[in-house]
C-alpha cells in the first residue's frame, strides 16, 4: 500500500514543478524528496517523472496519478482545516457564481439552508453563462458544468448532468423515429449553422432547421415539435417525466457533463466557503446521480 504522505509529496512536486520548491514547501530536504519519489516509482512500477538538469516533465502516467494524489491531498487538508476551525460559524459576505440555468433552478434551497443555519452570513449570487475569473472578480465559490480547465482551482465534484437527444411525441408522430446513423436527414435544433452530433457512436454533421443561442429556447422548440434537440436533463427533466419530450436512441445519455464547486485555494479555507460547499454537496448530488431522469423511458 502506498503511504498517503508519499502521494501528497508527489502532488506537491507536480504542482511546484521542482524538487527544491516542493522540499521547501514540505519542510524536508531535496534529497529526501528525490529518494521518496524514486521509491514511489519503484513500488508502482511506472515512471512518473522525467528528470533533466533543468526541469521536470510529468509522464502520461504521472499526470493521471498526480490528479488522484492532488484530490487526496485536498481531502487531507480539508480534514485538518475542519479540526482546526472546529465549529466556527461563518459570517460576512460570500460571493457565488453559477451558470444562469443551474442557479435559477437549484441554488435557492442551498442558499436558503445556508442562511438559515448561519444568520451572520450574507450571500451574493452572480448568474453568468461564462467561466468567471474567481480571484480577479473577488468570487469565493463558482459552479462549473463541464470539463475543468483551470488546474489552479480546487474542485469538489457535486454530480453529473446527462445530456439527451430529445423530441416531442408530435414530432415523432409526424416524422417517425430518426436514424441515429443519419441525423442529417432529420430536422434538428442546433446552436450554430453547422454542428457535429455523436449518436450511438456515429458522428453526423447536421444542418439545423432552427439555430438558437439559448438552451431553454431549444428545449421549448423541441416541445413544440420543431425538431430534435440535444439538451441537459437539468433543463428537460420535467418535460421528459410528463411525456412532453421523449429520449431518443436508448436510455444512455449523449454525454455526461460533470458539475463541480470550485474555489481558489484550500489553504486556510474560510468557514463560509467550506460550509457553503458542504451545503452544496449535501443538497445537490442526488439530482444528478442517475444517467437519466427518474421515470424516463426511451421513445
Image: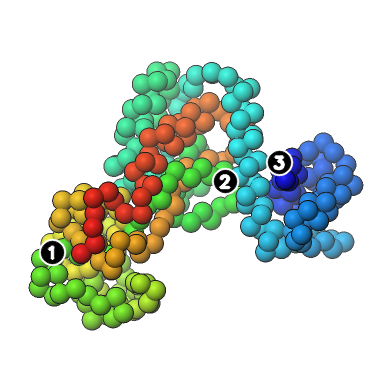
Q: Quadrant of residue 83?
A: top right
Q: Residues within 10 Å of mark 1 (few under 14, many from 20)?
A: many
Q: How far separated are the C-alphas under marks 2 and 3?
A: 21 Å
Q: Is residue 170 above or below residue 64?
A: below
Q: How far separated are the C-alphas under marks 2 and 1?
A: 43 Å
Q: Residues within 10 Å of mark 3 (few under 14, many from 20)?
A: few
Which label was assigned to residue 153? 2
Q: Earlier in the sequence, mark 2 or mark 1?
A: 2
What residue appears at the point 9 percent right and 73 percent down from the top-left corner?
Answer: 174
Color scheme of the displayed model:
rainbow
Query: Do labels 2 and 1 touch, CB within 8 Å?
Result: no
What residue appears at the point 47 percent right and 21 percent down from the top-left corner?
Answer: 91
Residue hosting label 1: 169
Which label was assigned to residue 267? none
- Please state if 199 lies on the left or on the right of 93 as rendered: left
Q: How far separated are the C-alphas under marks 3 and 1?
A: 54 Å
Query: Do labels 3 and 1 touch, CB within 8 Å?
Result: no
Residue hosting label 3: 4
In the foreground, 22 or 241: 241
Number of marks in picture: 3
Q: Could you tell me if residue 28 is visible in this image?
A: yes
Point out the frontmost of discs 2 and 1.
1
- Please state if 15 lies on the left or on the right of 100 as rendered: right
What residue appears at the point 81 percent right and 40 percent down from the top-left corner?
Answer: 24
Q: Earlier in the sequence, mark 2 or mark 3?
A: 3
In the foreground, 136 or 79: 79
Amino acid at each position: 500500500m502506498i503511504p498517503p504522505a508519499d502521494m501528497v509529496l508527489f502532488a506537491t512536486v507536480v504542482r511546484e514543478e521542482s524538487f527544491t520548491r516542493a522540499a521547501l514547501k514540505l519542510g524536508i530536504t531535496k534529497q529526501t524528496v528525490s529518494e521518496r519519489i524514486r521509491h514511489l516509482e519503484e513500488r508502482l512500477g511506472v515512471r512518473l517523472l522525467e528528470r533533466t538538469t533543468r526541469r521536470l516533465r510529468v509522464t502520461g502516467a504521472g499526470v493521471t496519478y498526480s490528479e488522484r494524489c492532488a484530490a487526496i491531498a485536498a481531502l487531507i487538508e480539508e480534514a485538518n482545516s475542519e479540526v482546526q476551525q472546529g465549529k466556527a460559524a461563518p459570517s460576512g459576505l460570500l460571493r457565488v457564481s453559477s451558470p444562469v440555468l443551474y442557479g435559477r433552478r437549484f441554488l435557492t434551497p442551498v442558499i436558503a439552508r445556508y442562511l438559515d443555519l448561519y444568520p451572520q452570513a450574507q450571500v451574493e449570487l452572480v448568474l453568468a453563462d461564462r467561466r468567471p475569473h474567481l480571484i480577479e472578480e473577488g468570487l469565493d465559490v463558482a459552479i462549473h458544468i463541464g470539463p475543468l480547465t483551470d488546474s489552479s482551482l480546487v474542485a469538489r465534484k457535486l454530480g453529473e448532468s446527462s445530456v439527451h437527444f430529445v423530441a416531442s411525441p408530435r414530432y415523432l408522430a409526424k416524422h417517425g423515429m430518426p436514424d441515429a446513423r443519419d441525423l442529417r436527414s432529420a430536422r434538428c435544433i442546433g446552436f450554430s449553422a453547422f454542428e457535429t452530433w455523436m449518436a450511438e457512436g456515429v458522428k453526423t454533421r447536421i444542418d439545423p432547421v432552427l439555430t438558437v443561442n439559448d438552451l431553454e429556447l431549444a428545449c421549448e422548440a423541441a416541445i413544440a415539435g420543431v425538431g430534435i434537440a440535444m439538451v441537459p436533463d437539468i433543463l428537460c427533466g420535467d418535460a421528459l417525466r410528463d411525456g412532453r419530450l421523449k429520449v431518443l436512441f436508448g436510455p444512455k445519455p449523449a454525454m455526461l457533463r460533470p458539475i463541480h464547486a470550485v474555489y481558489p485555494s484550500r489553504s486556510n479555507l474560510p468557514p463560509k466557503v467550506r460550509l457553503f460547499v458542504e451545503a452544496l454537496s449535501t443538497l445537490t448530488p442526488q439530482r444528478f446521480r442517475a444517467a437519466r431522469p427518474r421515470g424516463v423511458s426511451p421513445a
